Amino acid sequence: MEHYNLAFSGLGGQGVMTVSQVLATAAAHENVQVMVFEGTGISQRGGGVFSFVRFGESYSPKIPIGGADALISLEISEIIRIIQYLKPQGQIWVNSGKIHGYYTKLRPELYPMEDKIREMIRLKTNHLSMIPARRLAQEAGSAQAINMTMLGAFSSVNSILNMDSIIWAIEESSKKFAEVNLKAFWIGYNFAKNEGMTE
Amino acid sequence: MSDYKNLGTHKLDKPLLLSANQALARGAIEGGVTLVTGYPGTPSTYAIEALLRVPDLGFRVEWSINEKVAFEVATGVSWAGLRSLVTMKMSGLNVASDSLVSVQYSGTNGGMVIYVADDPNTYYGMVEQDSRLFARFAVAPMLTPSSPQEALDFTHRAFDLSEEIGRPVMILMTTPLANTSELVQLGEIKSITREPSFDFDIARYAKAGPAACVQQHKDTLASLVKFGKLTDDLNPLTLTDSSVGIIASGITWNYIKEVVVSNNLNPCLLKLGVSNPLPKEKIKMLLSKVDTVVVLEELEPIVEELVLALRSEIDHPIRVVGKIDGPLSMTGDYNADVVSSAIHDLFPTQVAKPEIPDDLSQHIQDLQVKRLITFCSGCPHRATYYALNEAIEKLGYKKEDVIITGDIGCTILGMNDPFQSCWTEISMGSSISLAQGFKYAGIKNPVVATIGDGTFFHAGIPALLNATHNKTNLTIIILDNHWTSMTGMQPNVGTEAHSTEKNKHLIKPEEIVRAAGIKNIQRVNPYQIKKIIPTLMEALSSPEISIVIADAECAIQKKRGGKGGGFLKVKPEKCVGLDACEHPCLKVTGCPAIERGEDGKAFINPDACNACGLCHHACYHGAI
């Protein structure tokens, strides 16, 4: 298959690694070569995390600067962590919801303005889609399923892998949460299908 | 999720999606191990974690009390003729090193493999340390896989190699490799059935006088030479008509391969799958064909120094591009961009210098959200540090009057906001001995050491006995949450849930402290803030060594065990708002469950709250 490079970012506990592994499992199911890099650090205790998923034959688990076809961020400000990896005019999918940490809860003005984030994104691309993923995930029955909502939204315009494999991989990932995860995936999918890339 | 639950499968038809850690674990299964031991230290942790999730594994896997013990237990199995693997991160190798050198000199019988994970760029804290130097130091053979597939293949083979040369074989990976997954082709599982036996041979298994010791050293050196010959195929050399040669080791091989393939380069390439001994002849063959050599190795310039030394044996001048004269760095880890930058000058028309434009860079810098690495909501340690700071204040000391030494693990998060309690962090168990030193130096005010249960068991006990024996007046707080938590909640000798398994005996820190003859011991529940503050005040004022055991299970594990639950609520009519409040719960506890509501008042996220009650105590307005 053609190369396709995808980077995720978010905060510890948001499911960045789970959604990356879902895609990799789906790729493996189709015998597509895939490589996943987990940039976790001590994220469990409140830090940012990122991951790279590389489809097709690649060597470095880390995507080079300007090498990602698309970025998916599960938290709006965390797009900053991976923006440098985007190809010119690549796609950016961002959960529009903010998650504050200790310092920005105390001083909300320290959290970057959305306009500034959009301004930064425009330096790289016009293809930005802001998804109200938290609301959509809650509609599906679990705010925890933001990762699946974002994957659904991304999958509405991208078909790197067969939809059947992705659905299968979501079910495999957690039997317990398969139903709510699939619901979240489809709600995200339909939302983005109707909205298109917003910019 | 990945496929690690199928690690024990015999089916070979389909590759599995495995991280290098998991692939290494599979390599041990294929290699026919009888025992796997280790101590949790990320990025190495997930090799053993993967094994522990395999049903019906058929051999023993143990989180040992520390790396040295893990190493020695694994040695016993090897000396009895069976195969063993021991895993640790680089800091753990330092702990195990005393025995590593000794066993390397004595040699082993059953195949013994030591997996160590380095962490250049310190993704997980601690030091940037190059364990290849340890291999050299211990005369230990070392393999450096570059991919998850090689992690499996090298590990499997390392057991055979270890038996061929009669020495333990080290396998080194770094964080980015350990955390990378790909489709890995499995091999056959070796079935090894041997009766354990051990020959009486003092000259080999003891250090019986100078003659025996020097002979052991000679034998070890010879074994390393033999290892080099047996593993020549792991250092493939590709000669082309290019005048540029590139040497890469471990994961850096994949970075250069990415750059070579994507830019259609054709340099001479030497891949080092073996980091000790280094293949001198192959390096000389490369040098003789090129006029420029690029050496790609993270951290120490070990290969580069050898290249510089061998350069004098070549009859033409050779430029060496590495880190001694630049442009590569001695710190941090590499990636394809670092490699491109380093070789851009050599291939100016083919390799672009990767750059982040200034305006984007500026935005990235300006818009970063600073985030606090802190205790989970409901963590008992948060309550302990909160109480400790209050106790110090109530005794009339200023914060800077009382030295608090910290230790490794979750407890060290007390160094961060809002507590800024821990002043120091050295290594496992060091909080107590360092505090003793401060007292010996003549510090008049109380000195406090804080240490978690896992760290106490690992290396804190000798320090405790030393301070106790010498009647040093310290306050030692053992923050006992019953788990080795920072690395993902591994059990230790004091974990009840683990000790219900058969053949496990539960040991609590209090029993050990009592056995040392310390009189002044208090065990308190850190959530009972009103009790723990006076207890700490008493301990700090005591004229002799005093121990406070802050005893409450890790909030995450408690919840997983179905014991936690519940949440607290803010009464909005009583909350004066986070900005107006003189003692805001959010600010003083740093609890991640406390949010700023739209009205500026505190709001507790019921999904995140673990009902520990610390905010209830912290609120001066009775609003929680």
Image: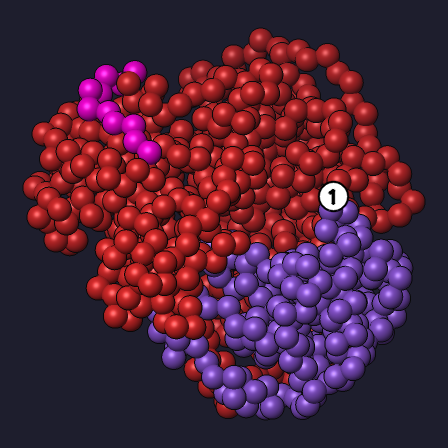
Magenta part of the chain: B515-525
Among the 4 quarters of the image, the one containing residue B597: bottom left
Few, some or many C-alpha atoms within 10 Å of disc 1 (few <14, some 14-19, many ≥20)? Answer: many
Left or right of residue B525, residue B356 in this image: right
Chain identity of mark 1: B
Left or right of residue A144, residue A42 in this image: left
Among the 4 quarters of the image, the one containing residue B372: bottom left
| Magenta residue check for B185 | no
**Residue at the spot of label 1:** B4
Residue B313: horizontal and vertical position, in percent?
Answer: 58, 61
**Colour chosen for chain A:** purple
Among the 4 quarters of the image, the one containing residue A140: bottom right
Which of the pair B301/B487 is nearer the observer? B487
Q: Residue at x 75, y 69 (%)?
A: A187
**Colour chosen for chain B:** red
Res B397 seen here: yes
